[in-house]
Image (cartoon, rainbow, N blue to C red):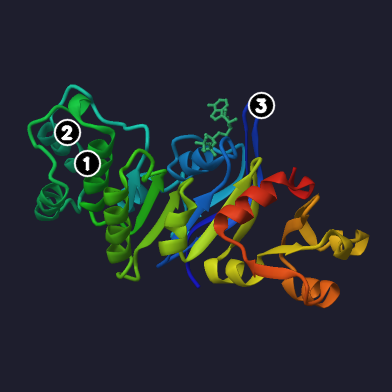
Amino acid sequence: MENAVTLNNVKKSFKDFQLDNISFSVKKGFITGFIGPNGSGKTTTIKLMMNLISQDSGSLTMFGRDHAEHAKHLKQRIGFVYAENHFYEHLTVRQMKRVIASFYREWDEELFVKYMDYFALPWKKKIKHLSTGMKMKFSLACALSHHPDLIIMDEPTSGLDPVFRRELLTILTEVIQDENKTIFFSTHITSDLEQIADYITFIHNGKIILNDTKEALNDQYHIVRGANERMDEDARHMFIYARETSVGFEGLTNQPEKIRRKMGQHTVLEPASLEDIMVYTTRSERYA
Ligand SMILES: Nc1ncnc2c1ncn2[C@@H]1O[C@H](COP(=O)(O)OP(=O)(O)OP(=O)(O)O)[C@@H](O)[C@H]1O
């Protein structure tokens, strides 16, 4: 399967934080959700992909080309939606659109007008007077209107009401019908990813913990509940995280079959949600 983006042993250090030789790929033609707790390195990774900062070591390729060497060409192929907006606040929507459109060879004015109507965006309003949701819609309209092959978004749904969030997910599902398009986006709203993501990449403390299909995670990761007397040292090793209380234990495992064999019928297993996976893995000493 072709990769839209490949990171190989990428390292980036700040004073108190480092992306620790991360390697993963974003599959072409699919939606990948990028999750991780606050400060885990999502925005830093996205900035590296966008060539807004440079890695200390390692390689980053996009559509098979080195992303820094071919930055100019690759920028044409990427639609970028960023939470901290990068617009000139004093311009109107129309003026700002003109600035953005001038950068892109493939700019499609007809498509942009369609999104302006669809999102009910005001042409004459100054950027500084747009609400958070409107700015995000404008950013999205611009990103989609130059027919990008890769759409990269940093928390696009944050600050959006549930109605528009759902619209956004519908738009993304429509965009991805074209199998040449790829979408990579970070979010804290894991339920959005349960709906639309094909792949999940999970980062924690600057390390990639998971990068797999959502189906594989659903099959593998389970929440287990049972009586404390079923838990022993052997069983404990099969859990990523488990806690015992007076009413019993609850934990996350990626070895459901082994647990079933070991703990027997009186233990309840159910597929873990992405939120469960994120919360329990973050608590685990294994990934500290
Ligand atoms: N330019 C910088 N200089 C120093 N430290 C930085 C810089 N940029 C980011 N960091 C640090 O790197 C860490 C990771 O930040 P990053 O923004 O990538 O996390 P994140 O996963 O996107 O978090 P959030 O979910 O809160 O947006 C943080 O501790 C942050 O303070």
Q: Amino acid at mark 1?
A: Phe
Q: Is residue 278 left or right of residue 179?
A: right
Q: Earlier in the sequence, mark 3 or mark 1?
A: 3
For the residue with label 1, is its CB less than 8 Å from the closest atom of ligand 1?
Answer: no
Residue identifier under label 2:
96
Residue type at mark 3 is: Asp
Q: Secondary structure at mark 3?
A: loop
Task: Give the side of residue 84 with respect to residue 214, left or right.
Answer: left
- Towards the viewer: 133 or 180: 133
Q: Residues within 10 Å of mark 1 (few under 14, many from 20)?
A: many
Q: Quick one: 19 or 249, which is closer to the camera?
A: 249
Q: Are marks 2 and 1 in contact (CB under 8 Å)?
A: yes
The residue where tag 3 is placed is 16
Residue at point 82%, 77% (across, down): 261
User: Residue at the location (47% across, 39% down)?
Assistant: 47
Asked if residue 185 shows in the view, the reply is yes
Label 2 element class: helix
Quadrant field for ligand 1: top right
Closer to the chain start, of discs 2 and 3, is 3
- 47 to 175, vertically: above or below: above
**Residue 147 against residue 285 in the figure, above or below:** below
Which one is earlier in the sequence, the residue at label 2 or at label 1? 2
Q: How far apart in space, not on screen, are marks 2 and 3 (Cα)? A: 36 Å
Residue at position x 36%, y 56% from top?
150
**Residue 8 in sight from this viewpoint:** no
Location of mark 1 (residue): 138
> Which numbered disc, 2 or 1, marks the residue closer to the eye?
1
Q: CA distance from mark 2 to mark 1?
A: 10 Å
Q: What is the spatial separation of the Cα atoms under label 3 and label 1, in whole angstroms?
A: 34 Å
Disc sitting over residue 39 in the figure: none
Mark 3 residue CB less than 8 A from any atom of ligand 1: yes
